[in-house]
């Protein structure tokens, strides 16, 4: 059974004056999914986040959050959303506990449930020992935790995070990423970022944005294979002529990297590695090492955005 859709956006358009900054954006988010909205700075990610949370209204298009129309039923729809803007909405002179209780009241958490929500949210965000501290005295990493805590204290179905690790040091980034992965187990999460490593480490699915449009969407794993042929590099101490390697079942191309190392690309529906090893054993080619080629997200992102720019 497919997971329930928690957020649906259809044909969103947003204009600043005569300029269209968001054009025809449509996406869906399912429960238990972490979606990465990836793009260069200025691609339109933050504006899209503001549309999805109702802080900006689209000039055209529709948004549903857990079945509620964001334009027609904003109170019900926004109650299902937790939002962390790029600049966390923190009152730096407040204590962590006081601020989170304030956030819970804004989100209309029942008075009898606030203490339990506060304790659970602090546990999830690693803030158990920070409740009595002034927010302004905390490190940036802990302030970011407080920002995420205010977004989840009412246990929303959809969590929207805009550049949640920007400006953090490597240890803080690792901690925040672990927290986001944990949130993705029970909620739906949209993560806006321009960091490729963020998507590789956190996201189940990726949407690439450029010039206010979504230009490509797929799972994170499949996207890393985008534009890459299936293949491997093999070492043959007694290699045959290239024509014999090309004649192996399914092989599309052979490139000699050295006298004994060869890069071989093959069709995705054939087991050419096994066929080559069998041929090597029969022909005495002395195969010693076979390494599958690995795609990466950076190559796919560059190729996709360059293709779109050229188009």
Image (cartoon, rainbow, N blue to C red):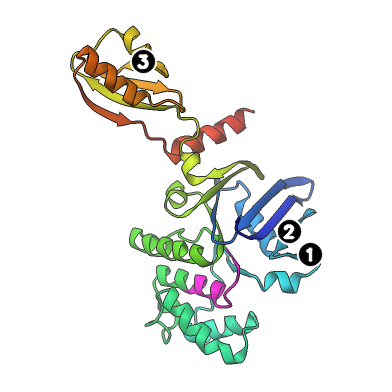
Query: Which residue is at the front of the view, 9 or 283?
Result: 283
Is the C-beta separation of discs 1 and 2 under 8 Å? yes
Query: Which residues are drawn in magenta?
Result: 146-159
Can you identify the residue that label 3 sits on?
248
Position of residue 91 measured from the top left corner of the image (x, y, whole percent):
54, 78
Query: Residue 172: x and y, percent?
Result: 37, 64
Q: Helix, strand, or loop for circle 3?
A: loop
Residue 38 seen in this snapshot: no
Residue in view at x 34 percent, y 16 percent: 255
Q: Quadrant of residue 67?
A: bottom right
Looking at the rendered structure, the secondary structure element under dot 2 is: strand
Sequence-earlier tag: 3 or 2: 2
Q: Residue 24: image x %, image y %?
A: 73, 45
45 left or right, relative to 263? right
Quarter of the image where the C terminus is located: top right
C-alpha span from label 3 to label 2: 52 Å
Residue on which disc 2 sits? 63
């Amino acid at each position: 059974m497919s997971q329930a859709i928690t957020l649906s956006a259809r044909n969103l358009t947003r204009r600043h004056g005569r300029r269209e900054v968001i054009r025809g954006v449509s996406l869906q988010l399912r429960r238990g999914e972490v979606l990465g909205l990836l793009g260069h700075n200025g691609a339109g990610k933050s504006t899209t986040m503001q549309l999805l949370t109702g802080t900006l209204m689209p000039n055209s298009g529709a948004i549903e959050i857990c079945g509620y129309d964001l334009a027609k039923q904003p109170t019900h729809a926004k109650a299902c959303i937790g939002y962390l803007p790029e600049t966390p909405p923190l009152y730096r002179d407040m204590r962590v506990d006081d601020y989170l209780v304030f956030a819970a009241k804004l989100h209309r958490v029942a008075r009898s449930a606030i203490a339990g929500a506060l304790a659970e949210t602090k546990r999830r965000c690693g803030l158990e020992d920070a409740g009595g501290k002034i927010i302004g005295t905390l490190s940036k990493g802990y302030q970011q935790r407080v920002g995420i805590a205010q977004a989840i204290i009412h246990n929303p179905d959809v969590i929207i995070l805009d550049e949640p690790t920007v400006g953090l040091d490597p240890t803080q980034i690792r901690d925040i990423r672990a927290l986001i992965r944990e949130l993705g187990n029970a909620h739906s999460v949209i993560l806006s970022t321009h960091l490729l490593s963020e998507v590789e480490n956190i996201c189940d699915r990726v949407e690439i944005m450029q010039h206010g449009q979504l230009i490509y969407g797929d799972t994170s794993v499949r996207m890393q294979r985008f534009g890459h042929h299936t293949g491997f590099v093999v070492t043959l101490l007694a290699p045959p002529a290239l024509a014999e390697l090309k004649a192996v079942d399914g092989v599309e191309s052979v490139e000699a990297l050295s006298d004994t190392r060869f890069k071989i690309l093959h069709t995705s529906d054939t087991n050419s590695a096994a066929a080559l090893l069998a041929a090597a054993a029969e022909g005495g080619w002395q195969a010693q090492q076979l390494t599958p080629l690995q795609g990466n997200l950076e190559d796919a992102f560059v190729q996709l955005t360059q293709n779109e720019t050229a188009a």
